Every structure is written in C-alpha cells, then in structure tokens.
Image (cartoon, helix red, strand yellow):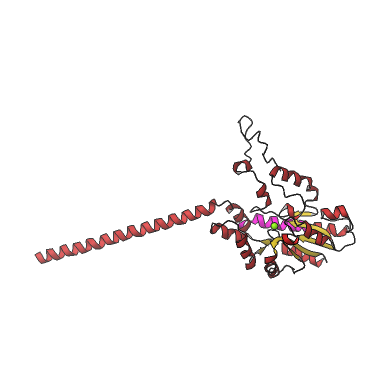
Amino acid sequence: MSRYKSGFTRTRKRFSNFTRLIVLGGIFVSVLTAVGDSAFAQQKIDVELDPRYNAVTYVQNSAEFALLSEQTYRMALSQLYVGMEDPNWTADEVQIVEGGFHSKPPAVILDCDETVLDNSAFNARNILHKQDYESEIWNAWCQEGQADAIPGALDFIRRTEALGVKVFYITNRRDVVKAATIRNLKALGFPADETTVLTKNDDLGRGDDKVSRRAMVAKDYRIVLLIGDSMSDLCTGMDVYNTKRRNEVALEKTSMLGSRWIMLPNPVYGSWQRALPKAEKALKPKLTPNVESNESNDKSDPGKF
Ligand SMILES: [Mg+2]
C-alpha cells in the first residue's frame, strides 16, 4: 500500500511536473507569439508611417493611377495628330522665339523616370528598408534595369514611331547609367539607342534644366510634344525654391499645358518638394475667419495653385 501510495505520489509528482512543463511551455510559446505579433504590428505601423507610403501604394495599387496615366497618353496622342498637321506648331519655348523649325521633321521628347519608366519598386524597397534616397542606391537600381513601364507609354510611343515621328528621351539620369537605361527601355519594348537617350552630365554642359539637351534635338527637329512628370521637363524657369513663386511661374505657362506640353502625375517625389515651406506651413487647413491664426499674415504662405 505504502508502495502504492509512494508510487502514486511519485506518479502524481511526475504528472504534476509534466503539467507544469506543459503550462510553462504554453506560456513561453504565448509570450513568443505575442512578441512576434507585436514586432509584426510595429513593422506594419512603421511602414505605414513612412511619408512615402500613401503615394507609393497609390502608384502601385490604384486603378486610378493606371487610368490617369493611360488617359494622359491618349490625350497626348490626339495632340500629336493636331501638332503634326500644323507646321507652325512647336512645343519648345526656344523654337517659338527663334523660329526656323517649320520644315524640320517632327519629334517628341519624353522624360524617362515616372513618365516612361515606373520606379515605384525602388521607392517601395526604400520604405521597407527604411532607406532615404541616395544617388548611389539610385544608380544601383538603374543598373538593375528593373523599372516597369508607365501605363499607356508604350502604346503611345509605338504609335508615335509608326507615324514617322522621332522619339527622344531627355532624362536626368547620369551618363554612368545610360547603357543600363537603354537596356531597361528596350527590354520593355521601347525604341531607344545611344542617340535618342540623352542623359545628364553637368561637366559636359548637359545640365539639370534640360535646356541644352532640348536645343540638341531642336537643331534638327520640330518638337511637337514635350511629355514629363515635372515642369522642368517642359519649360525653363522652374528652378525656383519658393512654392508661391513656382506656382506663379507655372500659371504663366498653362496655355501650353494639355496642348503641346503633357504632364504625367507623380505623387511620390519631384522638384516641387524642394520649394515647400517647412512642416505644417505646407498644409492649408482653411481656418474659419473667426479663428485667429498666426498663418494669416504669413508672407511665406504658399497660396493656391
Ligand atoms: Mg521624371
């Protein structure tokens, strides 16, 4: 009996130890799961807090962005037909002033990034890696040649070529990634070669403002359309680092927009960011008139556009 008792006691102790082990193990797993869930939730929140998140997810996921780009290129094609029929038509401000373009063959100039090439995967990577833009990682991305085509761009350019219109790309990608850019364009089906992809090189007079490169094309061609996601793809005078002034300059030029200049949407980045007032001064909350605001007399208020 005593043996039984003592055996029962041992068994009960073993059972008790086993139960304790199970319970402790369960708690340990629960804690690990909770920590894992918390880390996942934290990562999810961190990604969504990145200032680029909304813009990049809009580009990569929304039907609206794809349709807006398609719509823009359809409008570009109809304007191309109009411009081709009119020998007095040019999209280039310098050609308008200097003349002498009427008998030149027609050409279209497009920007590359966020106009023809979609680099949203690069920006998505940077969000996930908590990485800011740096020229080294940008050049590495360009060398990969993994950019996609902006919706509508390929069809527009193929039709443009079929009409006998020369297609040029003026991009602020540097010479060092020119070959990779041509490879990327060609892999997507775009016509592109050494002579039609004009990259940037400040030392050789091919500057950020694209003026000298537009002049290179204008020498031999009538520029029927300029297409880009930044005002500097279309005209001069946009290197203004004040939003109000920048918008005033743009307003002076709107007669060309939607006609000879075609603008693509790019909510992710652009030269407009360099002109923004600091932090909350860039927001326009439309305060009610009876609410006193320090902003109301602020001369740096960016105003409307
Ligand atoms: Mg661009």
The residue that appears at 84% across and 57% down in the rendered structure is 83
Residue 186 image point, x, y percent: 71, 69
Which quadrant of the rendered structure holds the C terminus? Answer: top right
Q: Nearer the viewer, residue 88 or 249?
A: 249
Dominant secondary structure, magenta? helix
From the viewer's perspective, is 211 left or right of 41? right
User: In x, y percent, where is residue 241?
Assistant: 69, 47
Give the residues in magenta.
61-76
Q: Quadrant of residue 169?
A: bottom right
Q: For residue 292, which quarter of the picture?
A: top right
Give the side of residue 210 with respect to residue 5, left or right: right
Q: Is 73 part of what is drawn in magenta?
A: yes
Residues 67 and 188: in front is 188
Residue occupying the far top of the picture: 290
Q: Is residue 42 left or right of residue 55?
A: left
Residue 166, located in which quarter of the rendered image?
bottom right
Residue 99: image location, x then y, percent: 89, 55
Q: Is residue 77 visible?
A: no
Q: Is residue 120 above or below residue 187?
A: above
Q: Is residue 97 visible?
A: yes
Q: Quadrant of the N terminus?
A: bottom left
The image position of residue 219, as x and y in percent, is: 84, 61
Residue 296 drawn above or below residue 223: above
Q: Which quadrant of the picture is home to ligand 1? A: bottom right
How many numbered marks, from 0 up?
Answer: 0
Q: Extreme left residue here?
A: 1
